[in-house]
Amino acid sequence: MSLRSLVLTDPLYEYLLSVSLREPPLLKELRKETAGMPEADCQIAPEQGQFMGLLTKLMRVKKALEIGTFTGYSALWTSLNLDPGGKLYCCDVSEQWTSIAKKYWKKAGVEDKIVLKLQPALKTLDEFIAGDQADTFDMAFIDADKANMPAYYEKCLKLLRPGGLILFDNVLWAGKVLDNKLNDEDTKAIRSLNAGLLKDDRIHLSMLPVGDGLTLALKK
């Protein structure tokens, strides 16, 4: 029994991984390659990736959306767990980062399941909405520039079917959401998003201390 979530020490975290993580070798290889990059802190944790894969399988996702793909680790977890015939639409602006992603998607044999959109995500989302794709997506993962997270949310909510799930990464922002001295656009946007989601009666809500904070919003 516990009245609150545990604070994970390094040994306890390593134990958690040792008894639960089932990371395919190719995903581990991608994670290790990404860890050597200067932007490595953009990578999600392996237990978060596995959790997202489980949610994908649990919900029998056939049409998914990802905003912020980086080197493709989260996309690989999702695509490997899509229902047969499923598609994942990835939004990013970096050809450099996504070139690494495409290499691993091809190795994993999932390149035909992934559609990469290399342009600002808001433009892609608007194109989907204009193309009569509202209420057709099963799941969306938002992990891109934080200042636009509230805007991404509103557009993803339109695109998701009732019962569809939106996942938001970095909602605890390494604790910076509590630092009143920090008022940059990213931090303010995350605070605004978190406060808004709490009051939003269009969704069912849960925030979890997974990775850098992961919020799940289920569309009613």
Image (cartoon, helix red, strand yellow):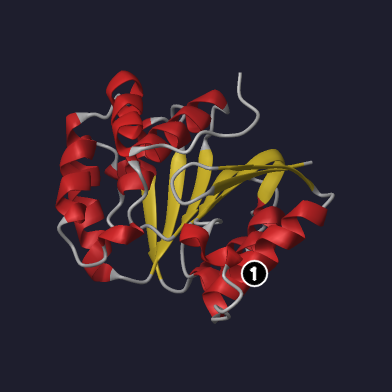
- Identify residue type, mark 1: Ala
Residue under label 1, please give it. Answer: 151
Relative to residue 25, is residue 133 depicted above or below?
A: below
Residue 78 in view here: no
121 left or right of 43 in image: right
- Residue drawn at x 58%, y 28% is 59
Q: Position of residue 67 (x, y in %)?
A: 48, 59
User: Looking at the image, which is closer to me, 145 or 111?
Assistant: 145
Find residue 92 and report its image quarter.
bottom left
Image quarter hosting the N terminus: top right
The quarter in which the C terminus is drawn is top right
Residue in the image at 34% along x and 60% along y: 42
The residue located at (67%, 59%) in the rendering is 194
Q: Is residue 199 left or right of residue 157?
A: right
Q: Is residue 17 above or below residue 111?
A: above
Please identify the quarter of the rendering in which residue 204 is found: top right
Left or right of residue 169: residue 14? left
Q: Is residue 82 visible?
A: yes
Element type at mark 1? helix
188 vs 107, left or right, is right
Q: How many marks can you see?
A: 1
Q: Residue 123: x and y, percent?
A: 54, 73
Which residue sits at x=52%, y=69%?
A: 146
Badge 1, how many Cα within 10 Å: few under 14, some, many 20+? few
> Foreground residue, 137 or 101?
101
Q: Position of residue 103 (x, y in %)?
A: 17, 51
Q: Quadrant of residue 50?
A: top left
Residue 201 or residue 85, whichever sits in front: 201
Query: Where residue 38 sits: x, y (%)?
Result: 20, 67
